[in-house]
Amino acid sequence: QVQLVESGGGLVQAGGSLRLSCAASGSIFIGAMGWYRQAPGKREVVAVITTNGRIVYADSVKGRFTISRDNAKNTVYLQMNSLKPEDTDVYYCNAKTTYGSDFWGQGTQVTVSS
């Protein structure tokens, strides 16, 4: 079983920055980690990073958000700059194990005021 603890959400004005963190514990077999947000009807990817550093970003955040990870700590970060009101959402951390299981954090609220 993998536990994910998220931190770093909050309220910020448009143009501001926030940094999300997510620490995984309970397994040494952590593979890709990433951040998703809750669109109507589904969770959509924001950014994902593999253990060897391959990164995928949603088109809407390219150039503004940066994902990184510390493999030794099984921790993933999301630096969010130039935030827009449309970035307001609940952001969920995701971790996939190397044996194919999927785990989610409890979600952290990001609110961007105009």
Image (tube, rainbow, N blue to C red):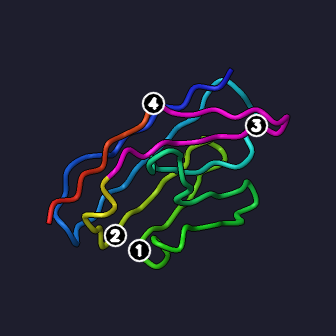
Residue under circle 1? 64
Q: Front-most of 17 and 41?
A: 41
Q: Front-most of 85 and 10?
A: 85
- As displayed, is residue 31 above or below residue 104? below
Task: Categorize mark 2 by other alpha carbons within 10 Å: few (<14), some (14-19), many (20+).
Answer: some
- The residue at the far front in this view is 41
Question: Label 4 amino acid?
Answer: Gln
Q: Which of marks 2 and 3 is nearer the N terminus?
A: 2
Residue under circle 3? 97
- The residue at the far top in this view is 1
Mark 1–mark 2 Cα distance, whole angstroms, equals 5 Å
Q: Which element carries disc 3, helix, strand or loop?
A: strand
- The residue at the far bottom in this view is 63
- Point out the image quarter for the N terminus: top right
Residue under circle 2? 81
- The magenta stretch spans which residues? 89-105
Mark 4–mark 1 Cα distance, whole angstroms, equals 24 Å
Give the x, y percent position of residue 77: 49, 53
Disc 4 to disc 1: CB gap under 8 Å: no
Q: Earlier in the sequence, mark 4 or mark 1?
A: 1
Mark 2–mark 3 Cα distance, whole angstroms, equals 29 Å
Question: Label 1 amino acid?
Answer: Arg
Give the x, y percent position of residue 87: 34, 61
Residue at x-position 16% and y-position 60%: 113
Question: Label 3 amino acid?
Answer: Thr
